[in-house]
Image: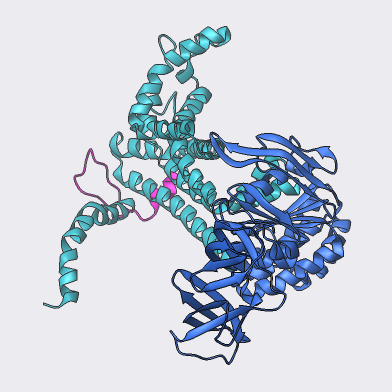
Amino acid sequence: MAEVQLVDVEKRYGSFLAVPKQSLTIEEGEFLVLLGPSGCGKTTTMRMIAGLEDITAGDLMIAGERANDKPPKDRDIAMVFQNYGLYPHMTVAENIGYPLKLRGMDRKTREARVQETAEKVELQALLKRRPSELSGGQRQRVALARAIVRTPKIFLMDEPLSNLDAKLRVTMRAELKHLHHELGVTTVYVTHDQMEAMTLASRVAIMREGRIVQLDTPKKIYSEPADLFVAGFIGSPSMNLVEGRITGGRFEAPGVSLPVAGADRGDVVLGIRPEDLQLTDPGAAPISGKLYALELTGDSTLVTLRNGRTSVCTRGPADFEAPIDAPCTLAPKPGARIHLFDKQTGQRLDA
Amino acid sequence: MQDRSLSYLLLVPAFLIVLATTLYPLAYSLVTAFREWDLTKQRRPGDFVGVDNFGYAFSEPGFQNSLWVTSVFVITSVILTLVIAMSLALLLRRKGRMHTFTRVILILPFAISPALIGVSYRFMFNPEFGVIAKGLGAVFPALDGVPWLASPDLAMAILVLTDVWHWAPYMTFMCLGGLASVPRETEEAARIDGASNLRIIFGIVLPQMKGVLLVVAVLKTIFALKMFDQVVTLTGGGPGTSTETLAFFIFNVGFKWYDMGYASALAWILTAIMMLISVWYVRMLLSERKMATA
């Protein structure tokens, strides 16, 4: 276990700035998720921690020691790759035991450790097989076992679940979470899947164009997104964002009129999560429009209404039915959070 | 006319050409191999002599010598080509302008005709005025005036050198292709697991390239077994018979001594050796594939 610190770390490829100068502290035992769309620099950041990419400027500290110039093998890290990175010419047992073999551990101790680790990820029955004879989920388990077998100080996981099918992904997610709880090793996890990030992380760092735009607990990121990008990225269905203006203590947009705290101004974006809205009787409803789409998800129905350029979505009961284009009205639930953002900068406006 | 018969009809010209240029000579040489045929006396193959021509081969020192020379040549040139091609491929796999440029000029030796390579090297190793012989002599005075091609061992070494020089680039390209199919992640995983660079090459990269290396080795072996051009233009089989490869020996038997029966038998022995290697290779490849997909 160890703390990882990035101090003003920067990565350039020639003249291309991949990750601009930034700092980040990953606390001991923490499960930190780097979340962002593809090409946002999250994998590059992780590969710099791993030592697979050189750091152009700044310092990387692992357990208080500068690690910039240490080769990967001396950083005491283990990494799980998106495509598993298993050695195809070795059996499962040889794959798991390889890091131990390289460290000169004798055969007997090694085999015992491999056995013990295999039990942890339920691979005992497959130890003699080769990677090509395994399913995607099993391969991912082998990669995990190879990472945990030598109890490293830090785990790095680069989209480890993205090659698995949806169902398996959910199962493996729970296994990962349990494993982290059991081992308590500092973990850095890269993903573009916000659901994975929210469920797994102690803290999430949301990245965009190489920069960390918000670093906080999943709860805080969900309830207080720092800007429009985060607001739109986190949550499913994503937050309703409505452009409008504040006049006389009310937010006004086509079909929307809500009381808000804040001085009068134009160019405001109001954000409200679908789960913070409910269908309501027509009358003095703050949000009104015509029904645009109904999507049954099983336990509920996603109801989308439109009014001019305003489009608002909410979750209604599963048995909700109405014809398309029927008038429809919504109101915030009691205690609902209303978020305001500056349209120009995208930054959160705090009341 | 039906499509099926039309397609056969269209194949006829091609088949006739193959028949006339390949199948007929092949069959003719097989017939000749069992007959006595001295080209200075007979215009057609003479009496049937059973397996005498084959039997003679194994008691005749010329053939035994050429078999030995060919073995030495094949083993050294295959190993050297393989090692050099693989090393070059590992050096050239990185992307970059210099690497691309080097890859392009690397193909030049392969573009030169082998017979011409023999002639060039013969000049370059001439002790009187050869650029390599003189250059080596200038750097290492002890090597000045060494009769490179007049010494049996050195002549063989130079013959191997020309062949490796000719083939290594092409085999480098095959190795580069193989390298491209080795996933980078396995190397990165090994690096993080704590493997040194050498260990990554020998423990992770090369085992994954087994299939490609096998193809390279077998192709190079077959090409080396047929070694002829440079022998003719570089060493002439000499000094003595020290570089007389099997193909060169067969040529001499047939077209210098005019013993066509014996030459045909020898040619079929060479064919048998190559077939054995090919069969072994296909078996290895099949078992490899079985292992990969099982």
| Quarter that holds the C terminus of chain B | bottom right
Residue A3: x and y in percent read 83, 48
Q: Does the magenta stretch include residue B47?
A: yes
| x and y, in percent, of residue A114 in the image | 82, 62
Res B207 seen here = no
Q: How many labels does the image show?
A: 0
* Residue A161 picture quarter: bottom right
Residue drawn where x is 63% and y is 39% of the image: A11
Q: Which chain is depicted blue?
A: A
**Chain coloured cyan in this rendering:** B
**Quarter the N terminus of chain B occupies:** bottom left
Residue at the left extreme, as displayed = B1
Q: In this view, does B136 lie above or below A46?
A: above
Camera-side residue of A140 and B73: A140
Q: Residue at x 41, y 17 (%)?
A: B124
The residue segment tinted magenta is B34-58
Vertical placement of residue A117 versus A342, above or below: below
Q: Is residue B249 left or right of residue A291?
A: left
List x then y, in percent, for residue A220: 74, 62
Which quadrant of the view contains residue A216? bottom right
